[in-house]
Amino acid sequence: MSTSTPTAPRRVLAPLSGLLLGMFVSMIASTVVSTSLPVIIHELEGDQGAFTWVVTATLLTTAISTPIWGKLADLVNRKALYQIALVIFVLATAAAGFAQDPGTLIAFRAVQGLGAGGLAALSQVLMADIISPRERGRYMGLFGAVMAVATVGGPLLGGVITDAFGWRWNFFVSLPIAVAALIMVQRTLPHSSVSSRRPKIDYLGIVLLSTAVSLLLIWVTSAGSSFDWWGTETILMVGGALVAAVLFVVVELRTSEPLVPLTLFRDRTFTLAVVASIATGIAMFGASVFLGQYMQMARGATPTEAGLMTIPMIAGLLLSSVGVGALITRFGHWKPYLVVGSILLTAGATLLSTIHYDTDFFLVSVYMFLLGAGVGMTMQNLVLAVQNTAKPSEIGVASSGVTFFRSLGGTVGVSLMGAALATRVTDLFGGAQEKIVAVLTALGPEGATWAKQLASGALPRVATMPESLRVIVEDIYAQGISSAFLIAVPFGVISILAVIFLPNRSLSTMTTSERRQASEADLATVSVPAGMDAVTATGTVPVVDPDARADETASEARR
């Protein structure tokens, strides 16, 4: 088999279609509720903290479970794992549709994240099994296109369903697509080779990682509202997170099958890609969460209108991911696009931190387009760079490692942005108290109703407010959301530096399976001479020179 020939599209597209449909299910199930979240939280009587945790719970369990799925991918059948992840994700999504309070919704969203972690990690690993890094750019563009279609179609579909049938149907719409995805994966995806190693799960590492990340996120989300930034709770939570993190490192260094092999960080490509992926996660998840909220809370849009208004960001993501993927496959160069992408991502986040409720929507669209283009250029190609240099036996943990830190960055980023938004909104409401009271008084009996809703702490339905009150509330939420985007800017600058120093290695033309076979063939070729050279001498064997032996015989005859 020639390893230099481009992968036959027909041979690749059949199994790839199952992965694409699986990704579409996971994306549509997540994005279909994005524009309806303000409505959902309002009807379940949740506050800004509940709004943030509905998103953060999914991101948290996605981040924690991603390296677990990646580790399992190196040990057991990947196809079966992918199907299990898909079933977990869809069942949890459907169950969330029956939630009666924010706590139940958050719990089901957390289970949903367990499946999402598997779909995110395993789709990259399975694709590496059938497509070489050089050819992968073109097909990663397809993943970007599916992601863009789901991200555009999801909010639009969710808005229409919410306005026409109620928000609960958003959680049921992905079920028929999931059944189709399972059938497609079963029929088209080839069985992956199973490692000869006995599966050994690092349970202690899982517990310590979950503890460290959970404590940190609970502290970030609750500090300043439920308790003071500096106090006993902060000492316990931050101290506990640090202790758990240190113990996690110790365990990973000592166990034979670590959850996250710390030896991966010896590779400069992996380490810098991880740093850059954190900023990508913050920008991607932060934008998807808070732009929808900005459209509804700061511009008075309905869920359907909010979905339409975020199209510029998705257009940037779609065009950049598909276009750059094709260019990488054609010319083999990947680093320039990552550099440009990280710059666009940082520029988009910086510009979005300046928006107000009355900012010209054309400018907001340009800012969203830049952010989307930056995410499209960096997200998949950081994984590509890591897979290109990772050992075939570690392709699962290496791929999931980048995805894990991207999810972790998004989780921490959304928590920080949500905490900053909640704090800023509270301060602004306090500063505008006199103006709000005057407006409510002028509204008469209707003002008392709105005063009660604002005092409850639940997210208000801005679109239904009287004009005089709506302008004040829109201005407050616009300032809060713009300050939240400011948090992503320093991480974007760090990502630019990380991408600049990434080693610019040529893309391999071999799939992971071919690389594994080649490495085994190379080992077999060198094993005999290498083994002989390595054998330690056990004694001296005398070697007799034939001429010397003849002289010795003649001398004995003369005697």
Image (cartoon, rainbow, N blue to C red):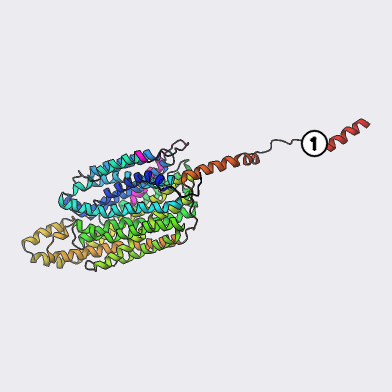
Residue 33 seen anywhere in this rendered image of the structure: yes
Q: Quadrant of residue 280?
A: bottom left
Magenta-drawn segment = 187-216
- As for residue 188 lying within the magenta part, the answer is yes
The amino acid type of the residue labelled 1 equals Val
Image coordinates of residue 153 in percent, x first then y, are 25, 53
Horizontal side of 130 relative to 181 (left or right) equals: right
Query: How many numbered callouts?
Result: 1
The correct choice, above or below, for 336 with respect to 17 in the image is below
The kind of secondary structure element at disc 1 is loop
Horizontal side of 525 relative to 323 (left or right) equals: right
Tag 1 residue: 544
Q: Residue furthest right?
A: 558
Image coordinates of residue 67 in percent, x first then y, are 40, 46
Answer few, some or many: residues within 10 Å of disc 1's Cα (few below 14, many 20 plus, some between 14 and 19): few
Residue at image point 39% right, 52% down: 140
Image coordinates of residue 465 in percent, x first then y, are 13, 61
Horizontal side of 72 relative to 172 (left or right) equals: right
Residue 233 seen anywhere in this rendered image of the structure: no
The correct choice, above or below, for 322 with respect to 516 in the image is below
The one of 176 and 257 positioned closer to us in this rendering: 176
Image coordinates of residue 19 in percent, x first then y, are 35, 45
- As for residue 126 lying within the magenta part, the answer is no
The one of 85 and 63 positioned closer to us in this rendering: 85
Q: Residue furthest left?
A: 445
Q: Quadrant of the C terminus?
A: top right
Q: Quadrant of residue 414?
A: bottom left
Residue at image point 36% right, 52% down: 142
